[in-house]
Image (cartoon, rainbow, N blue to C red):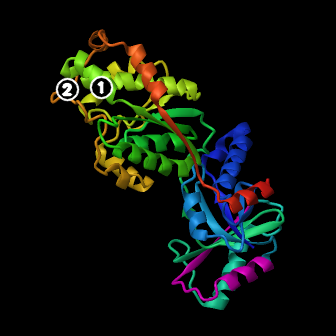
Amino acid sequence: MSSVVVHYGELALKGRNRPWFINTLVRTIRAALKDLDVGATRKLMGRIEVRLGPTADWDEVRGRLAGLPGIRNFSRATHVAADLEVISAGVVAALAGRTAESFRVSARRADKRFPVSSMEIERTLGHRIQAVTGWPVNLSRPHLTVHVEVLTSEAFFYFDKHDGAGGLPVGTGGKVMCLLSGGIDSPVAAWRLIRRGCRTDFVHFHSYPILSRTSQDKARTLAAILTRRQLKSRLALVPFGTIQQQVVISVPPPLRVVIYRRLMVRIAEQLAHRWHAHALVTGDSVGQVASQTIDNLIAVERVATLPMLRPLIGFDKEEIMAEARQLGSYETSIIPDEDCCTLFTPRFPATRTSPEAAEAAEADLDVEALVEKAVTEAVVEDSRFPVLTSAAANRSGDEQ
């Protein structure tokens, strides 16, 4: 029987809360694969098994599991009885047609009641493989490793391991709201919180119809990329162009960028309260642009009543770009667009704005009315992954 053996990392260290974390990961895996030919997903001793149906698309299964937070690594495995002769025969049969310059056997005996020790399993199976194939054993740098995991009444063997995303299962870390700009940084910031188990919703500020819809399209695509990692998301598209026009009329040019961002934080926070999010997330990195100096970050954060999380605060641009490429968001983020951050931006923005100066600059603005108008006019879009066809939806309903 073909299975996937999933291993988790820090979940094993969660003490009394460990079953809840593992159950959450099991439910997430089921949801991520529910439109594929996948059978039971069940927790075992220190691992999770996903049983594959005869028509399961392994490449699709592998891609989805690799992006799910909470998984350390996983392997496509053969499920057999916990009997050394059965295991040996299965491994030898599975190696037919393979070539290897060297090999080793790595065995783990999860249930110590199994009468043969891990070391003895490795020796016995190694001798059997060598007798059939003639391959030399190399314990330090083998060309092929045969992995064997023995449980109470069943066992698995496999030859390859695939890295997972690590971290914690989505839904175990609360809910946050990310200000999604459409650039390189904010999707990476969102992913870092998703990877720590936080369900992340998004708010994007745009200047349509003053500017084109490009930034909105980018935000949707970026949200979709991140939704593949957390399976469901909510995106608010907030019109911001008319607010910027009001700021241009009332605020001195050097302070406008800080005032824009203070208004964005207020609007995002209102949406966060409505959606029961517990913190705001931004892609800020110290000194990357004028609005991200320490002074300006403080001036912006002063208006927030929720915590503001900045997971990229100490990263440089090259590090963020590398992570964006790994996430799969980079190519979308670099598409040229006209976003609200470039509209009405002064030539020489202030870099050391005090909270008091920002408050004085807002004196002629009806901040409460601007925020309320933006929240009211926001367009909210919900998305899920996978998107089920009618047949898959029926199959999922039957399984429930």
Tell me the distance, in whole angstroms, between the alpha carbons under discs 1 and 2: 15 Å
Circle number at residue 244: 1
Q: x, y (%) of residue 307?
A: 48, 24
Q: Quadrant of residue 250?
A: top left
Residue at 66% over, 90% down: 132
SS for tag 1?
helix
Q: x, y (%) of residue 278?
A: 55, 27
> Around disc 1, counting alpha carbons within 10 Å, would you say few (fewer than 14), some (14 to 19), or many (20 or more)?
many
Q: For this view, does 400 lie left or right of residue 391?
A: right
Residue type at tag 2: Pro
Label 2: which residue? 349
Q: Quadrant of residue 4?
A: bottom right
Residue at 69% over, 84% down: 92
Residue 246 vs residue 199, the one in the foreground: 246
Q: Is residue 222 above or below residue 277?
A: below
Q: Is residue 296 visible?
A: no
